[in-house]
Every structure is written in structure tokens, then in C-alpha cells.
Image (tube, helix red, strand yellow):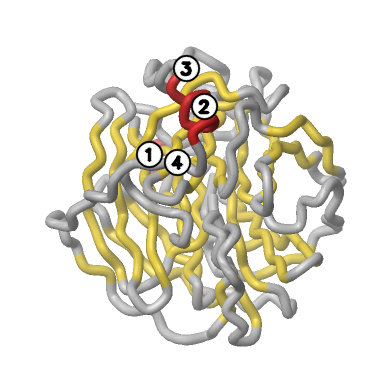
Amino acid sequence: MSPSLRSIAAVALGLGFAACGSKSGLSLAFDAGGLPDASADAGVDVSAEDGGPNVEDAQAEDALPPIDANVLDVVKPNNCADAAITLVYLFSSDGKLLSFDPATLAIATIGTVACPTQLSPNSMAVDHLGVAYANFTTGEAGEIWKLSTATAKCTPTPYAPKFGFQRFGMGFLGDQDGGEALYITKSDGAGALARVALPSFEVEFKGDFSPPLSLCELTSRGDGQLFALCMKNNGATLAQVDPETAKVIGVDNLKVGNSTSAFAFAFWGGKFWIFTGNQGVGSTVTEYDPALKTETAVLTTKEVIVGAGVSTCAPVD
């Protein structure tokens, strides 16, 4: 649920990863370099002026209510572990798989991902059992690989792109019956939503986002609510989305991020955890509280985070 690159130009360095998420338009090369230490920095100023791609989209967003911060009572996925021990998993631009503990703000390296592919990492989601699914893409090619969140080991899947879903954000969503489903959102051009059936990996098109959104990543809340984080020229739109129709039912406009950012995000403990950065600079971790509508930069890391995922068993408050 997460991601955790959109419409930015690909940096050709060899093998690669892009976020839920990556989620940015950035296609970054897959490099086996080491992971610098993360360092806390609560003083980072998230001060980008909010903006949008065009006036019509901004007016459509203004007509929508804010996202609903109230958590619904639903059936949890089967076989959930203790929610308190769940972590957010991250993918960096140099191919590292990491874990992030929102309770302590600790980032730890799990290992280097070495999938036998020439495509670039672009996004990641994690199922309720802690298995990661990563989108790798370059040009017109797109793949999904399974990653062990214990060892970073890669396993291929039979995913074959349909409906233009080569590069996409992704996230798992809990079903009302206690199961879960993988959703993806097209990163290139106008945003659209699809569901990927597991284990067949067949793609079911759900629709274009209405009103339109682009440069999006996905995550979900443990109560079955789906959210898209979509970059704008300045700032971002956090949208609550109907998973069956792709209709946008609520939006919060954020100051964090822009259309050139690598980005990913995940929901944990009542907050959205947003990762934004650029190559050569690193990433900032921003905590967004949907009830208070506050954005707080809580951490910086030298790594560029391009994917994020979290179990649907994660705590919702």
C-alpha cells in the first residue's frame, strides 16, 4: 500500500526501480549501492504553495468534501498478526528494501533486491501476510515481482500489462469478507484504476478517475477505504476513491511534494506517512493527520524512497 515514480524522465543507470509508489513520475536506476543512515529532522519546512495542474481540476476538487477521517467497522483480513507489530516497508531508488516503524520513526535495511530484470523499480504494495509486490517498468514494458520482506528475495509472477498498465502505483485493499485485493493506478497520462486478481494476475479495469487525477500512488486503510496520493505542480491531492467505480469521493489538498518528486505513501496508526524526495537529495518523511489536517515533516533520509507498502492488518488509530 505502497510506494512505493510517475511521469518524470527515467535516469538510465542500469537496472532500476521507480513508489505507493515508483509513485512519482521518476524512473530511477536500480543500483546495488549501500544505504546511508537515516537521520531525524523534525525541523524540515513543508512550505510549498498548494497548486494544481489546471483550473478545471482545481474547481472539481474544491466541490468535493474532505476525505473522511472516521474509521469504519469492518472484518479484518484473515490470519492477521498483532497490528502493533506491523511495519511500513520501503523501496529505495538504489534497490534496497527497508522497514519503517512509525511508532519510533526507525528505518532499518532488510537487504538489496536483486530481481533478474532490466526494468526499473517503480512501486510496491504489501499484503496482509507481509509479502511485497513490486512494479518494475521501462518504456512499454511492465512486470510485477514478489519480494520477501524478511530476506528481500525475488519471485517472478505471470503479470502481463493490459489497458496501458505498465507503470503504476499499487496498494492492497481489504474486502468486506475478510479477504483482500490488489489495486493499481496508471501513472502515465490520465489516472485510471484497475484490480489485479491473485494468483492469476489478470487485470480488471475499473475506470478513469473522476474527476481526473494523475501521477498517483495508492494505499488503503484497514477499514476498506482506498486512497490515492497524486502529485501536482506544487503540492499534492490526497483523494478518497471508490474502488469499484474510480470515482473520487473526497479530497484533501496538501503542501507536500510536487510533480518532479519521487514519492510513496502508506497509512498506519491513524496517519498517512508520505515519502517525497529527489535523486541526489534524499527523501523527507511527512506525517499527515487526516483528522486535524496537519502536515508535519518528521524525518529525513539520504535514500530516495520510491515505494511503500503496509499490511491491511496495520492499526487504524
Where is residue 189? Give x, y as percent.
68, 50
Separation (CA) of disc 4 from disc 1: 21 Å
Instruction: Decide if residue 122 is on the left or right side of residue 266.
Output: right
Callout in the foreground (3, 1): 3
Image coordinates of residue 129 in percent, x first then y, are: 59, 45
**Residue at the spot of label 2:** 240
Q: Earlier in the sequence, mark 3 or mark 2?
A: 3
Residues at badges 4 and 1 in contact (C-beta under 8 Å)?
A: no
What residue type is disc 2 on?
Gln
Using the numbered discs, state the Cα–Cα distance from disc 3 to disc 2 in whole angstroms: 14 Å
Disc 4 target residue: 52
Q: Which of the marked residues, 3 or 4, is nearer the chain's N terminus?
A: 4
Q: Which mark is residue 63?
A: 3
The answer to whether 208 is drawn above or below residue 113 in the figure is: above
Residue 267 is drawn in which quadrant?
top left
Name the front one of labels 3 and 2.
3
Pick whichever, 181 or 212, lies toward us.
212
Depth check, mark 2 against mark 4: the one in front is 4
Describe the element under mark 4 as helix, strand or loop.
loop
